[in-house]
């Protein structure tokens, strides 16, 4: 089998595009416990993509159910080590940036030893209930849009790897 050599920057930008298309940053409350999860869901026919992501990141799990498969990371330490550096370096271009920022805030609350359990829960419930504003757009567009100020800057925001990843997640022919 031929070994694929992957450029790390290319992979990271591609992953951000895939995440903008089919990724989720979730903060969940079950059985009196909070957890975080980064997920990418695909149809089972695209299972190879999820295995590629897992191999490149060196962490995560894959589950299969019905017609879908899911790659996910729940371990907070792994999220801090593998996921946060990518999405801090290459911000999401869609409203998923709002969810990512909430996700990081939830992570900070969960890891803050200065809060009591009740304070953490209050802050996390308030954060979970914070809704996406109707007029939200990713802050990376600040210098390009509202109204379009510098169309040439779009070239620097939408990279080829991001576009390939987004189309792979959302596109169809």
Image: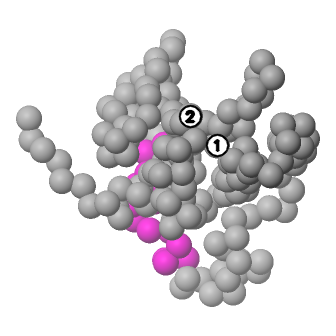
Query: In screen coordinates, is 101 left or right of 85?
Result: right
Image disc number at residue 74: 2
Give the residue displayed 57% in from the left and 41% down from the top.
76
What stretch of residues is rendered in magenta?
A: 154-170
**Residue 38 % position (x, y):** 57, 40
Using residue 43 as the reference point, say whether residue 138 is left or right of it.
right
* Residue 52 drawn at (x, y percent): 32, 39
Q: Main secondary structure of the magenta part?
A: helix
Q: Is residue 39 visible?
A: no
x 72%, y 44%: residue: 110
Percent from the top left, x then y, of residue 134?
86, 56
Q: Magenta span has 59?
A: no
> Which quadrant holds residue 144?
bottom right
Q: CA distance from mark 2 to mark 1?
A: 10 Å
Q: Nearer the viewer, residue 131 or 162?
A: 131
Q: Image quadrant of residue 138? A: bottom right
Q: Is residue 75 left or right of residue 138?
A: left
Where residue 33 sits: x, y (%)? Answer: 75, 26
Residue 29 quadrant? top right
- Neighbour class for label 1 at 10 Å: few (<14), some, many (≥20)? many
Q: Secondary structure at mark 1?
A: strand
Is residue 74 depicted above or below 115 in this figure?
A: above
Rendered image: mark on residue 25: 1
Please say if 85 is above or below 42: below
Disc 2 secondary structure class: loop
**Count the marks: how many?**
2
Vertically, is 53 above or below 44?
below
Crowd rating for badge 2 (residues with CA inside 10 Å; few <14, some 14–19, many 20+): some
Label at residue 118: none
């Amino acid at each position: 089998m031929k070994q694929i050599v992957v450029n790390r920057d290319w992979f990271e930008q591609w992953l951000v595009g895939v995440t903008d298309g089919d990724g989720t940053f979730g903060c969940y409350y079950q059985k009196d416990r909070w957890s975080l999860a980064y997920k990418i869901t695909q149809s089972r026919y695209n299972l190879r993509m999820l295995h590629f992501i897992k191999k490149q990141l060196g962490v995560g799990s894959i589950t299969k159910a019905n017609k879908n498969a899911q790659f996910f990371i729940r371990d907070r330490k792994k999220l801090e080590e593998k996921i946060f550096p990518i999405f801090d370096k290459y911000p999401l271009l869609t409203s998923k940036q709002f969810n990512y920022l909430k996700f990081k805030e939830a992570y900070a609350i969960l890891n803050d030893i200065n809060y009591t359990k009740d304070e953490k829960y209050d802050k996390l419930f308030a954060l979970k209930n914070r809704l996406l504003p109707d007029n939200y757009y990713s802050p990376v567009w600040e210098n390009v849009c509202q109204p379009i100020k510098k169309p040439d800057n779009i070239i620097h925001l939408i990279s080829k790897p991001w576009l390939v990843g987004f189309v792979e997640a959302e596109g169809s022919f």
